[in-house]
Image (spheres, rainbow, N blue to C red):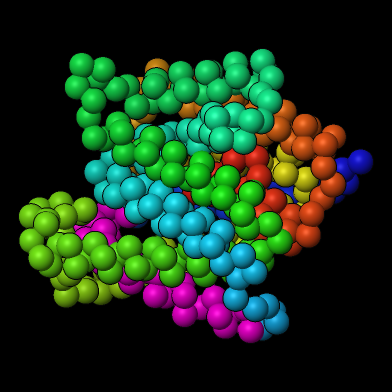
Amino acid sequence: MQDRAGVIAGAAFMVGGMAIIGLIDNFVKEIAAEAGLWQFHLTRSAMVCAAIPVIAWGLGVSLIPRRKLGVLLRSIFGALSMAVYFGALGVMPIAQVGAGLFTAPIFVLVLSVVFFGQGVGVVRVIAAAVGFAGVLLVLQPDLRALELAVVLPMAAGLTWALTALTTRHLCEGEHVLTLLFGFFATLGVVGALGLWAMAVGLGDGQSFATRGWVAPTGAFWFWTGIQAAGSLLAVSMLTRAYQLGETSYIAPFEYSFLVFAGTWGFLINDEVLGPGALLGVGLIILAGGVIAWRSGDRTEKEAPVRDGEAQGGAGAEEQGAPKVGL
């Protein structure tokens, strides 16, 4: 029986972490005005990768992965997802980008059926359909011309679903700091490769995603530092949330990100969602909660808790609930 106090505390940590992510990701536009996407990823990753070993040393945790291939694949998928996510944030409202990212649980269900033969009940199928309808209401795609601005957020959701699945099936028992270090290190490599591509003329320098290296300004260092510190704090809160409460109880609170993203976006950037988009956000939250609840109920009946889950490691992403804004 799940401890009530643990659920309440875990939910509080989850909501707090999502509030932080929803806040700091609104300032990506400030970074986009100062430098490019790839420079941001390289710089922020360097900051975080310098801090994680210090934290790991203090906790007595080894950052050497037990399952090197699994951690590598997870890191690649996660880095690709966040590269696309932050690239979209430079040109789109955060609530819209977040809606695309939160297609991850839907993709997790589809990929689990296709590649792992997992049985999916009628309730979760209906929830996935409702969630996808919600995403369409938020993104409002023009089906006559499939715009990149619509594809990007959903691509972030697909690659984050792959991150969740590799975490579940290939990274069991890995410590969360090991996974974080691998993720940010790989994202730094992606940033370096992007800068190289821009340097050899693959970008025109006119947008966030096509800009090469520029001399860092004080504003760039400040906002990138805020991103690095905020990400570490928020992720530690998300991890603590899953340590305190069962995944199936805690995962639905991740969808508070969409509420915070919309609220902060309105207060900071005057971004306003129309009635249809607000309805879509509500449908995404409802569908995600149902998927997490039904998946958690199935997992509790079929399998015991594993070591990685107790540490806030692999099990924290088992239900496909995305960790946004890393």
**Range shown magenta:** 28-57
Helix, strand or loop for the magenta stretch, by majority = helix
Residue 86's place in the image compared with 120, above or below, is: below
Residue beneath the point at 41% across and 65% down = 186
Residue 240's place in the image compared with 99, above or below, is: below
Q: Magenta span has 36?
A: yes
Residue 56's place in the image compared with 86, above or below, is: below
Q: Magenta span has 69?
A: no
Residue beneath the point at 35% across and 53% down = 83
Q: Is residue 16 left or right of residue 82?
A: right
Q: Is residue 249 left or right of residue 281?
A: right
Q: Nearer the viewer, residue 113 or 196?
A: 113
Residue 128 can be seen, yes or no: yes
Query: Residue 116: where, in percent of width, then height?
Result: 62, 36
Residue beneath the point at 59% across and 29% down = 113
Q: Nearer the viewer, residue 91 or 77?
A: 77
